[in-house]
Image: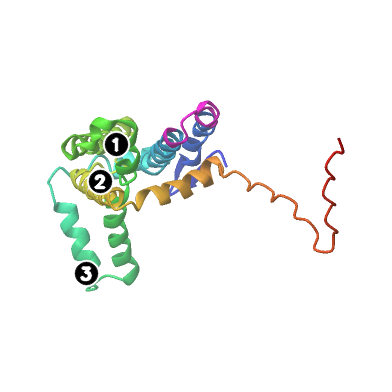
Amino acid sequence: MFSFTDGGLVLIPGFWALLPAIPIGVLIWRRGTDRRRTLMLLLALIHIDLVIALTIFPIPIAGQDFYRNTRGLSEDNIVPFTTIYVQLLSSITFQHRSLIASLHALMELVGNMVVLAPLAIYGPALWPSLRSWRRFALVAIGFSVGIELTQLAGSLLEGFTYRVTDIDDVILNSSGAVVAFFIWREMERRGWADPWLDRLRDVLLGSTARPAPEPAPQPRPDAEPEPAAEPAVR
């Protein structure tokens, strides 16, 4: 539960990255007055925490010596489109490769494209300056570069490449985020975004729909009408 072993490495699992998000999320939920902003803050928290759990964890804490001697820092890539080309070639051809390997390469491509897509939803909503696609693209690139630099720092500290630092990940992450930006802006323009956000808000924050008022009681059909009041005699 607290750690697991893989190939001789003792690793801290990614779910530890999720634990700090629980009290932060509760604080956001309890202090939120604007439900739309609260929803976006929770979406940002969930997204960032999942990115950390998936890209930084698991973290080796023991058993690194074998990999320091055999692997070292030898798998990083700084040549643009090298990894993309290999993954595309692997996903479209089955020569000398199994179906599982081809699907894995395709999943890596798609996963790198969508990993920063949620930023296109909550980013411009929380920071209006990001409604400019150029500024948004710079933030997406910075986000992705931050991930890769953190992975590189972790590998340097461990003494071997346990998380590959790849310039192609930055290209895929940021380009996927920009594509998601334009898709979301078009959904907003067509009025498709608000219903989806309303459903998500009801799931995360609870519905705000008020109960329908009870109908006024209707007279029974067999009830005799009350006699009209007689005029007062003067």
In the image as oriented, which residue stretches furthest toward the bottom? 95
Per the image, the residue denoted by label 1 is: 124
Callout 1: few (<14), some (14-19), or many (20+) C-alpha neighbours within 10 Å? some
On-image quarter of the N terminus: top right
Q: Please tell me whether residue 104 is drawn above or below residue 8 in the rendered image.
A: below
Callout 3: few (<14), some (14-19), or many (20+) C-alpha neighbours within 10 Å? few
Classify residue 63 as left or right of residue 148. Answer: right
Q: Nearer the viewer, mark 2 or mark 3?
A: 2
Compute the Cα span from label 1 to label 3. Answer: 36 Å
Q: Are marks 1 and 2 in contact (CB under 8 Å)?
A: yes
Is residue 220 or residue 180 the one in the foreground?
220
Q: Are marks 1 and 3 in contact (CB under 8 Å)?
A: no
Is residue 116 or residue 226 the one in the foreground?
226
Is residue 195 or residue 69 the one in the foreground?
195
Compute the Cα span from label 2 to label 3. Answer: 28 Å
The secondary element bearing badge 1 is classed as: helix
